[in-house]
Amino acid sequence: MTNITPSIDRALETYLRKGYSREWINQRLQAIQVRKNWRTNGATGT
């Protein structure tokens, strides 16, 4: 399993530099994780 912490940290720093709020960033990262879980668990787009 790959350690995803460095990529999450990079995303957080990038979004903060671009001026996004921490609340927006948290929602964005959660949405990304949900989509990743759907793909991992074989969910379809139907």
Image (cartoon, rainbow, N blue to C red):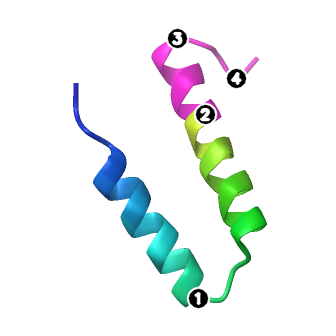
Q: Is residue 38 magenta?
A: yes
Magenta residue span = 34-46
Asked which secondary structure carries label 4, the reply is: loop
Q: Along the polypeptide, which appears first: circle 3 or circle 2?
A: 2
The residues bearing labels 1 and 2 have C-alpha atoms spaced at a distance of: 23 Å
Dot 4 amino acid type: Gly
The residues bearing labels 3 and 1 have C-alpha atoms spaced at a distance of: 32 Å
Asked which secondary structure carries label 2, the reply is: helix
Dot 1 amino acid type: Lys
Residue that mark 3 sits on: 41
Q: Are marks 1 and 4 in contact (CB under 8 Å)?
A: no
The residues bearing labels 1 and 4 have C-alpha atoms spaced at a distance of: 31 Å
Quarter in which the C terminus is drawn: top right
Dot 3 amino acid type: Asn
Front disc: 4 or 3? 3
Instruction: Return the x and y of residue 17 as percentages of the image width and height.
Output: 53, 88
Instruction: Return the x and y of residue 40 as percentages of the image width and height.
Output: 46, 18
Instruction: Judge by depth and name the residue closer to the eye, 27 or 42.
Output: 27
Instruction: Return the x and y of residue 26 as percentages of the image width and height.
Output: 68, 56
Q: Is residue 15 magenta?
A: no
Dot 2 amino acid type: Arg
Asked which secondary structure carries label 3, the reply is: loop
Residue that mark 2 sits on: 35
From the viewer's perspective, is 31 left or right of 14?
right
Residue that mark 4 sits on: 45
